[in-house]
Image (cartoon, grey):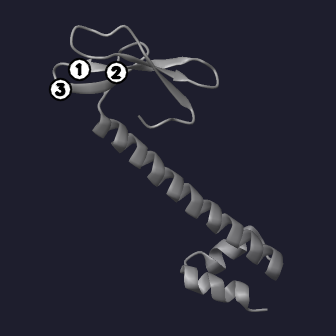
Amino acid sequence: MKKSKYLSFIEQEPKAKTKVFAVVNKLSNGLLGSIMWYAPWRKYCFYTAAHSLVFDASCLTDIRDFMDELMEDHKKRLDYSILLRRIVKKEGISLDAAREKYGNLTCKQWQEVLKDG
């Protein structure tokens, strides 16, 4: 099985026909939940520690994909902020003025502005 950098998957006492794993944070040793068979869906699922929520692999993939999209958006906003600050420094104008003047540029246009002068 694939090793995780942050999580330990510790096999527990098996049920009649299926396996059970505790999912533990390697840093804190905190129990995050369990992986065990969920009969209504006929597949292994992740249960939160309180067993109040159940996730299958596709649910977790959707959550991971959503978080990846959030991070991409965050990085774009961070890159935009860095570019604006370069303009502020280069042109000696306020951040609001830079937003107003350069707020709708494409990446290629940004490169041209920063290249000039």
**Residue tagged 3:** 41
Sooner in the amino-acid sequence: mark 3 or mark 2? 3
Please name which of the two marks, 3 or 2, marks the residue nearer to the observer.
Answer: 3
Query: Residue 53 appears at what percent x and percent y?
Result: 34, 21
**Residue tagged 2:** 53
Using the rendered image of the protein, determine whether residue 105 is visible from the camera's viewpoint: no
Labelled pair 3, 1 in contact (Cβ < 8 Å) = yes
- Residue toward you, 47 or 116: 47
What distance separates the C-alpha of mark 3 from that of mark 1? 6 Å
Q: Does 108 sit above or below residue 73?
A: below
Quadrant in which residue 43 is drawn: top left
Label 3 Cα crowd, 10 Å radius (few <14 / some 14-19 / many 20+):
few
What distance separates the C-alpha of mark 1 from that of mark 2? 12 Å
Tag 3: amino acid: Trp
**Residue tagged 1:** 38
Tag 1: amino acid: Tyr
Question: Residue at (25%, 16%) from the top-left corner?
Answer: 18
